[in-house]
Image (cartoon, coloured by chain):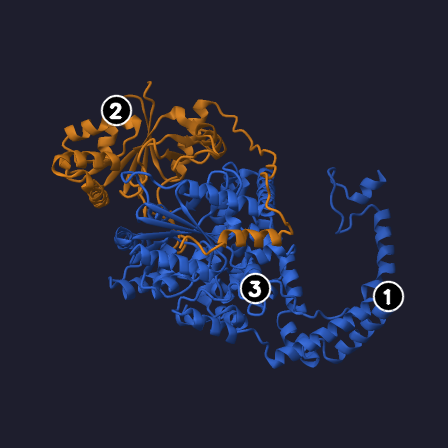
Chain colours: A blue, B orange
Amino acid sequence: MTMESRKHPDGPETFVENYRRALDDSGLRGALATATGKALDSRRQAVADVGEGDWERLRSRARAIKEHTVEHLDFYLAQLADKVERGGGHVFWAQTAEDARRYITELAARKGCGVAVKSKSMMTEEIGLNAALEAAGVEAVETDLGEYIVQLAGERPSHINMPAIHKTRGDVADLFTAKLGVERDDDIARMAGLARRVLRRRFAEAGMGITGVNYAVAETGTLVLVENEGNIRLTNSLPRVHVALMGIEKVIPRLEDVDVFLRLLSRSASGQQLCSYLSFLTGVKTSPSEEGPEEFHLVILDNGRTGMLANPHLRESLFCIRCGACLNVCPVYQKIGGHAYGWVYPGPIGAVLTPQMVGRERAAALPFASSLCGACRDVCPVKINIPDMLLRLRHEIKEGVRKSPPRAATRPAHHRLVTDDEADDEAEDELYVAPLRHRAADFVERALFMLWAAAMKTPFRYRAASRVARVAQSLFGRRNKDAARVLRVPRWAASRDLPPFAARPFRERWPELSKDAEEYRAAKIALPGDRPTRDGKGPAAARRG
Amino acid sequence: MEGLPGGREQMLAQIRDALGRRAVPAVAPAPLPPFHSNPDGLDAGERVARFIFELKRVGAGVEQLSTEAEVKEHLAGLLPAGTDVPVALSDGAALRRLGLREWLEGAGRRVLPSLREFVAEGLEAGGARREPDARGEEVAALVEQYRGLLLEAAVGVTAADLALADTGTLVIVSGEEQHRLISLLPPTHVCLLDPARVLPSLTQLLAHVRRRFNPPRAAPKNMTCITGPSRTADIEQAITTGVHGPKTLHVILYSPGS
C-alpha cells in the first residue's frame, strides 16, 4: 500500500474519490480483512461466553441507561460538574471545538508546559487539538502505540480503537527508520519496545497529560478510563496537570452503571472480558507527597451535540460508546477503511456522526455509503439503530433539512497546521456543491422514482408498466449497463444490478404453481420450502395430523 | 479564565432547550430500577480457582503460597540478579506485615519505598538544615527525584485490596497504598493478594465501593483494576505485552491467617 494515497488532503466532501482510491489499494484491503476478521471472531467468542440471553439483557440495560441519562442530561451534567469541583478539579464548559482548543492551549501556556502527552482520544481528534497545541508552541505527543504510529506518519487514525489498522508491520518498520533514525527491524515486539523507550522520555518531560473519558459518573464525580497499554495511566499519573476532555454524552448517573458498560465495551471492541487497565479517578491530591497530578481540568464539550439531542430521529447518535464493533462488521468499512470517510469518525457510526458534526452539506455522501444490511445495529452494544438514522439523514440531505446548528464543528481535525481564520475560510470554500453531471443524474433519478411510484399505485398500472418494461428491456438486450446508459443514471446503476425481467411474471404463473403445490401436498410430499417439524415430517403433513 | 462567563448556564440552557424543557430540574430524576446480573453460584474455594484460571488466561503468573518464608523465597526468585537494581515496594499493609522492606534490605537489595515514605525520609534526613518555608521546594525536588529513581526499578511490588474472579482482575485502591506508579513503571509487577479478598465480579466491586466509601459523599481518589500485563495489538493485531506498563505480572496468593 502506498503511503502517498492516504496523505492526500481528503475530507468527507471528496468521499467518492477517497473510496475509489482506497479500493485500488489491495494492501489496505488485505490489512482490513485480517484485522476486522480477527476482531469479529474474538467478539463473537466473547459474546458466546456470556450467553446470548445475558448479552441481550446487558445491551437492553445499557440502552436504558443511555436513554435515561440523555433524557436528564442537564441534571446529570450539573451534578457531575459540582462533584468534580468539590473534589478540587476545574470544569470548563466548551460550546465549540474552538472554545475547548483555546482553553487547553491557554492553560498549557499558563502552566509553562512545553510538552503535552496524550492518550488516545477521539474527542481530541474531533476538535483538532494537536494542531492547535503545535500552533501555540506546545509539542503534543500521542502515546498510544497505534496513535503514535499514525502521528509519526502525519496521518489520521483509520479506526476508532485500532488507529493503525491500515499499516503493516513493514510500514511501521519503515516509518520508525525514517522518523526515529533507527536500523530497520520489523519485529513487532521490538518495535513496541522501541516505542516504550522513546515515549518514556516524553512522559518524563511532559508538563501536561491529556486524556479522553470513557464514563464520567455524576453522583461521585469519578472518571472511568479504559485501556490496554497503560499509557492512559501514565498520562494521568505523571504530568503535573491532567486535562480530560469529554463530550456531554459521556456522563452516566451512578457508579453501578459503569458495570454494564464495562462488560459490553471490551468484549465488543476486542473480545476481551475486561481491558488490562481501568482507572477510577475521583478528585485531586491534597498533599504533595500523594501520587497523581497537582491539577485536574475537565473540559465538557458540546460541539454540535445539542443539535443531535434536539433531533428525535438522531438522538441515539449520542448513545455511542466508541467500541468500534460496527466498523469491523460493516461490509463497506471492511473494503474502504477509515480514511475514505474523510473525517474523525469512520464506519457506520461515522456516517451518522460526521454529517451532524461537520454539516450535512460537507458530508452529504456518507449516509448513502451503506447497504443498510443492519449488521451494525445487530452488533451495537447499545442497540443504536444506525440504519434508521442513515435513512433519516438521507432524507434530510435530499430534502435540505438542516437541523445541525450552523458552524458548530466545521473545522476538520486536520493534522496540518491551520489557523482558525484559515480553517473558517477553508470550510467556506469546501461547502458541498454537487457537480452539474451529478445534479442532472439526480434529476433523472428523481423522475424515474416518480414514474415508479405512479406505476405502483394500482394493480392495473403495475401490470401495464411491467409489460412495457419487459418489452423495453428485451430491446436493449437485457444488459444492465446498457439500460443504465440509456436511462442516464450511471451513478445509481454503477453498484446495482437491474435484474432481467422474467419472460412470464410470477403473478401470471401463480395459479398453476398453487395448483401444483396442492397436488404435492395431497400426495404428502415435502416441498422445498417446507420446514421439517420435530417428527421429521413437513408442516403440511403435521397440519393434516 | 475559569470558563467563559455563563458558559455553564448557557450550555445547560441549550441542553434543556434541546430536550424541550423549560425549568431547571429541582430534584434528582428517579433512578432506573436496579439491575441484577446473574450470581456466579460459586463458593469461596471455587471462586479462587476461577480467579487463578482467568489470571492465567490473561497471561499472568500465579502462585498460591501458605507461609511467609515461601512468599519471600518466591519473591526472591522473581527479582533480577544483581543487588544494585532497585526494587520498588509500595506501602500496603499486607507488605508491611510481612516485613518485606527489612527483609529485602537485609538481603542487600536497594529498596525504593512508596512516594510518601520516600518524601518523609528525605525530609527527615535534610530536616535540620532547612527553614520550614523551603519545605515545599524540597518536597517538589524529592518527588522529582523519586520519579527518576522509579524509572530505573526493575520490579514493583504491591499488594491488592481486592480481586475479581470472573475476569482475573486485581483491584488496588489508593489511600490504602500508593500503587499508581509502582504497579505501572517497572517492567515487572509482583502483586500480593489475600485469597479471601476475591469477589465474584465487577458488580460486587462497585457495590463494595458504595458500601465502603458511601458515594455520593466520597469515593477513593484512585482505584485501579489490573487484568494481566500491559498489552497492545496495534501492529497487525499481534498481541504484544509491556508496551507501556509491566511486561510481566506475577500474583502471589497468600493468606496471612494461614
Q: Which residue is mark 3?
A: A355
Amino acid type of the residue tagged 1 in the rendering: Pro
Residue A443 is at least partly visible in this image: yes
Residue B98: mark in rendering: 2
Amino acid type of the residue tagged 2 in the rendering: Leu
**Secondary structure found at label 3:** helix
* Image coordinates for residue A152, horizontal then vertical, percent: 34, 63
- Does residue A107 lie above or below A72 as drawn? below
Q: CA distance from mark 2 to mark 3?
A: 60 Å
Q: Are marks 1 and 3 in contact (CB under 8 Å)?
A: no
Q: CA distance from mark 1 to mark 3?
A: 40 Å
Callout 1 and callout 3 share a chain = yes
| Chain label for disc 2 | B
Amino acid type of the residue tagged 3 in the rendering: Pro
User: Is residue A536 rendered to the left or right of residue B5?
Assistant: right
State which quadrant residue A130 falls in: bottom left
Q: Residue at x 55, y 69 (%)?
A: A362
State which quadrant residue A449 falls in: bottom right
Q: Which residue is mark 1?
A: A459
How crowded pointer 2 is (Cα within 10 Å; few <14, some 14-19, many 20+) is rated as some
